[in-house]
Amino acid sequence: MSDALLAAYDAVLFDLDGTVYHGARVIPGAPETIQAAREHGTPVRFVTNNASKAPEEVVAHLTGLGMPAGVDEVHTSAQAGVVLLEDRLEPGSEVLVVGTESLAAEVAGAGLTPVRENGDGVKAVVQGHSPDNTWAALAEACLAIRAGALWVACNVDATLPSERGLLPGNGSMVAALRTATDVEPLVAGKPQPLLFETAARSAGAEKPLVVGDRLDTDIAGAVAAGIDSLVVLSGVATPEQLIRAIPAERGTYLAEDLTALTESPEDLKIGPRPGWSVTVENQTLTATGDGDGLDLLRALCHVAWETGVTELGEDAKARLR
């Protein structure tokens, strides 16, 4: 285990949806891999943009899926959103909550007053994912934001992975309010670095590793925080998105899923790979060779990122498939 990727870092910061589980379905091998990290002595933290559940609920969900965890190991975008509110509001200020009761409880726990309807006393709106968010709730938030209330979005994930597929995420609801108000919210969760920085500090880590499936949140947040990252293909990210990734959304390593944490870092690094040659011809990426398909993708990403050429030649497309 001393030569495994997880051994090269002093903490592992896991995204949840699409990385550790899909709703009620665990990613195969996740419990064993997380246990391997614990047995190695590598601190584990769970960092989620989903603001619908309190840390205690996240712990219960993880435990039910065979991954026991402590409340202190869970960091949510709801907690990060409340930190932004605390820094900007007077104690007792009214905050209109668009989200779950657990988000409202986080607001109350910070010494602020959660409300569900707009009124003269509302100083801020905090918006997090809830399957029960309604047009009426968005309408109350719209009125408050238009009246000048501070607007904090716990996250802006457009979609939410589930066992049934991708569903509308908080970002889709945020987009509706953005359209209705012409206002941009303060974003608390990933890709802002706050969640990762807080999780790393809680683990006493100076060299943590982020594991996530979304380039625009998990990986962008890691880049913003100056943290190495492992991109996994068990959730939202696709090979095409990886090849076309902008510098702010480029990971360090690439794997099918989080079980690769027990493999060698050199085998997972995005870059030139044995067995494959990738060149640029007529502004397209051409691949020759033979070997592992993920190695080909790592090599394609490397050349695309180095040259800015992202169009795949027919041979590269066929080999990647």
Image: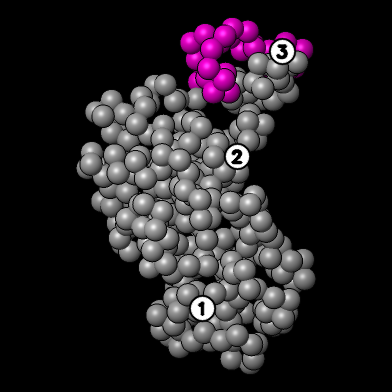
Can residue 280 be found in the magenta stretch? yes
Q: Which mark is residue 237?
A: 2
Q: Is residue 225 visible?
A: no
Report how far apart the C-alphas of labels 1 and 3 lie in the structure.
53 Å
- Image location of residue 254, percent across then percent down: 49, 30
Comes first in the chain, label 3 or label 2? 2
Answer above or below: position of 138 versus 233.
below
Identify the amino acid type marked 2.
Ala
Coloring scheme of the render?
one colour
Question: Are the residues tagged 1 and 3 within 8 Å (C-beta)?
Answer: no
In the picture, which quadrant includes the N terminus? top left
For the record, the magenta segment spans 271-297
SS state under label 2: loop
Q: Which mark is residue 101?
A: 1
Q: Is residue 198 left or right of residue 291?
A: left
Q: Which residue is mark 3?
A: 315
Task: Compute the Cα span from label 1 to label 2.
Answer: 31 Å
- Distance in Å between CA atoms under marks 3 and 2: 22 Å
- Circle 1 packing at 10 Å, graded few (<14), some (14-19), many (20+), is some
Local crowd at mark 3 within 10 Å, few (<14), some, or many (≥20)? few
Q: Position of residue 316 (x, y in %)?
A: 68, 16
